[in-house]
């Protein structure tokens, strides 16, 4: 009774937002939709939450068809849009009461579900939602999406624009909600968050690149990756890009992730090349692939 | 029901928390009522008057004195020549120039007949017409007195019979312009504010993204629409009440008819406007767009409502168009009820038309409102 998506396509005039998307989300799963801006994540969310109708394909959410049984879906899902969309001029308590009322329930009735999150914002319950910090806003939005005890929760980029601490807290909350049996579909452009999901789908330009567990996806990456560092990052990237055997060069924090075209690659050789390019403090270490590397590799082909 | 009540409660909270909007809703319209009612008048007053007296006799001076005594004319300028008067009119210094010919008095006594030259600035045709009437009235009045002075006994036999008309101005005996305008302007304010607010309201939820969140909930279309629009219905009724109180206190506008009847009609009328607002907000994505469209309709509705210019003098096709103008109905009814004391039966045909309009408009609006995008 999770989510099933088969062969969904949607285009806006000439732009093909989604092209033949198919995947399933198992009940109680925390499923991540990972992709850059404009990949079609929000469009897929809007189709699944019955706000948009797909051009073709079928989808069910909690066992209900998104077109035929849209009314049942609206009763059984929680949706948190990417943009903060609560009433800024109402207080925290009023927003929550409002959503509880239109779902025909009360805060008290489902209090245990939101309790852990709500206690964090309760000190501000009489503050207007517009005056909350970004992290608080997200918590309130999550409370509002949960107030009617949904079976499936849709979170569209919930942590975009939220500080790292709040992001971490937010993901811990999602994990706890998952333990309560709620199926969660979450989208994010952050690759580090992907590792926290049960399974992820990498999406780009309206197409699914790969679907698997984060651990398995990383294993799909066959080439050894090297962390390369030198005194001048910009010059290093340029030099690596000019290196004739380079396969991929991506900046990654304080390092550059480098892969080589050849199967037998000797880091010493690269070091010598870089030294000849007048780079100093060169450091080359082998490292493990991350989801980001996998994504870049898949997006490239 | 509980849902609707909660939405209504929420809307009111939002209206009263919007510190920028509150004065716009309640204070500005009333300022407009006070200012517009005093300013929007067709009475032509303070006419800048000039004359060229070529005669310089007691008769010609007596005629000029008549103009001087009139409250409509101001600033009497004595021009030495026609050329000077013409250039003054070109400069906009005078609106009306009276030219008294040479030998005016002598010829009047001899011939019992004379001509006067009157030149009127007719850029504003309507004002020029009114000015002409004033000038003619003064000269005629002067003429009657003159006859008495000049006639000799023998002439009495050939004097034509005079027909006098004594008009009675019903429903507005003193031709008080404000009595006529205040109810009309009140209609305008109730209409404008409710249309703008309702038109912008649902669009606002679209703009800030809350509509998307609402659309994913099981709330019914009707619950949401009623909950959102009802507060503006209340605002409209409140505006009518405040406006009526001001009309009585400041302008002492007569209220002959039953005010309950007026309220009953207004309650239907506001439904038409709210339906229109909802309809506009269904086809727009931003408050700005909604505002522009609402303005477009309001301007047409006002100018074709019979508020400022009588509908009877519009071309046939325009008269047909006014049938679709809700403001027209309300202006007519508020004037009928307040000034004439019309009763239920008198306004029934118009009220039925308004009711039909309300049903059609709201039907269209609800039909075009979609929860999916």
Image: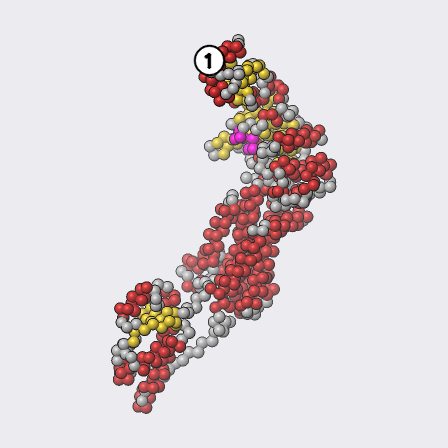
Q: Where are the magenta residues, as a range?
A: A37-43
Quarter of the figure with residue B141:
bottom left
For image coordinates 52% across by 31% down, the residue present is A38
Percent coordinates x, y for residue A239 in the rendering: 47, 17
For image coordinates 73% across by 36% down, the residue present is A112
| Residue A109 visible at all | yes
Quarter of the figure with residue A180:
top right
Count neighbours of disc 1 (C-alpha within 10 A) and say few if under 14, some if 14 to 19, many if 20 or more: few
Vertical order, A106 against B245 (above or below): above
Which residue corresponds to mark 1? A276
For image coordinates 58% across by 25% down, the residue present is A191
Front position in the image: B78 or B188: B78
Q: Seen from this angle, which residue lies furthest bottom?
A: B153
Percent coordinates x, y for residue B238 in the rendering: 60, 59
Percent coordinates x, y for residue B147 in the rendering: 34, 84
Percent coordinates x, y for residue A195 in the rendering: 62, 24
């Amino acid at each position: 009774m999770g989510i099933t998506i088969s062969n969904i396509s949607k285009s806006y005039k000439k732009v093909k937002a989604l092209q033949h998307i198919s995947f399933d989300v198992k009940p109680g799963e925390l499923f991540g939709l990972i992709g850059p801006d404009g990949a079609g994540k929000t469009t897929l969310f809007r189709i699944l939450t019955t706000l948009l109708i797909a051009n073709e394909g079928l989808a069910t959410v909690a066992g209900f068809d998104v077109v035929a049984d849209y009314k049942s879906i609206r009763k059984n899902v929680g949706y948190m849009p990417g943009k903060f969309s609560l009433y800024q001029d109402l207080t925290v308590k009023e927003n929550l009461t409002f959503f509880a009322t239109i779902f025909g329930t009360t805060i008290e009735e489902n209090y245990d579900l939101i309790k852990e999150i709500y206690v964090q914002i309760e000190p501000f319950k009489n503050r207007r939602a517009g005056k909350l910090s970004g992290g608080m806003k997200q918590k309130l939005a999550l409370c509002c999406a949960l107030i009617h005890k949904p079976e499936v929760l849709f979170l569209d980029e919930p942590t975009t624009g939220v500080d790292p601490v709040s992001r971490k807290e937010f993901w811990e909350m999602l994990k706890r909600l998952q333990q309560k049996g709620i199926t969660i579909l979450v989208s994010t452009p952050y690759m580090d968050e992907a590792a926290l999901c049960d399974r992820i789908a990498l999406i780009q330009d309206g197409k699914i690149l790969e679907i698997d567990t984060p651990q398995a996806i990383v294993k799909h990456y066959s080439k050894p990756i090297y962390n390369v560092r030198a005194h001048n990052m910009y010059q290093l990237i340029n030099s690596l890009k000019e290196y004739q055997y380079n396969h991929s060069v991506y900046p990654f924090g304080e390092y550059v992730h480098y892969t080589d075209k050849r199967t037998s690659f000797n880091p010493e050789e690269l070091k010598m090349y870089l030294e000849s390019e007048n780079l100093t403090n060169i450091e080359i270490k082998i490292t493990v692939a991350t989801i980001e590397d996998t994504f870049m590799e898949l997006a490239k082909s | 029901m509980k849902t609707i009540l909660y939405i209504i409660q929420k809307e009111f909270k939002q209206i009263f928390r919007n510190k920028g909007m509150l004065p716009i809703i309640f204070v500005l319209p009333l300022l407009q009522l006070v200012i517009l009612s005093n300013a929007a008048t067709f009475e032509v007053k303070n006419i800048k008057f000039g004359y060229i007296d070529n005669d310089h006799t007691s008769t010609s001076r007596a005629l000029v004195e008549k103009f001087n005594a009139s409250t409509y004319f101001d600033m009497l300028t004595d021009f030495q020549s026609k050329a000077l008067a013409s250039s003054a009119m070109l400069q906009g210094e005078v609106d009306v120039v009276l030219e008294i010919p040479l030998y005016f008095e002598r010829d009047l006594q001899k011939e019992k007949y004379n001509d006067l030259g009157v030149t009127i600035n007719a850029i504003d045709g309507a004002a020029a017409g009114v000015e002409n009437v004033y000038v003619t009235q003064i000269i005629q009045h002067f003429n009657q007195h003159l006859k008495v002075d000049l006639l000799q006994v023998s002439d009495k036999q050939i004097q034509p019979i005079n027909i006098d008309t004594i008009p009675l101005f019903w429903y507005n005996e003193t031709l008080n312009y404000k009595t006529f305008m205040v109810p009309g302007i009140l209609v305008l304010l109730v209409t404008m504010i409710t249309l703008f607010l309702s038109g912008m309201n649902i669009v606002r939820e679209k703009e800030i993204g809350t509509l998307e969140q609402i659309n994913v909930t099981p709330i019914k279309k009707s619950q949401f629409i009623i909950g959102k629009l009802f507060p503006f219905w209340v605002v409209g009724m409140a505006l009518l009440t405040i406006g009526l109180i001001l009309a009585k206190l400041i302008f002492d506008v007569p209220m002959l008819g039953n005010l309950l009847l007026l309220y009953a009609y207004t309650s239907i009328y506001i439904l038409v406007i709210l339906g229109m607002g909802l309809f506009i907000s269904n086809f727009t994505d931003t408050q700005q767009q909604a505002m522009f469209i609402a303005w477009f309709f309001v301007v047409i509705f006002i100018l074709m409502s019979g508020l400022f210019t009588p509908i009877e003098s519009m071309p046939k096709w325009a008269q047909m168009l006014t049938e679709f103008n809700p403001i027209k109905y309300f202006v007519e009814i508020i004037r009928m009820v307040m000034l004439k004391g019309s009763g239920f039966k008198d306004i029934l045909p118009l009220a039925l038309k308004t009711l039909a309009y309300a049903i059609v408009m709201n039907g269209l609006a609800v039909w075009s409102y979609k929860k999916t995008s």
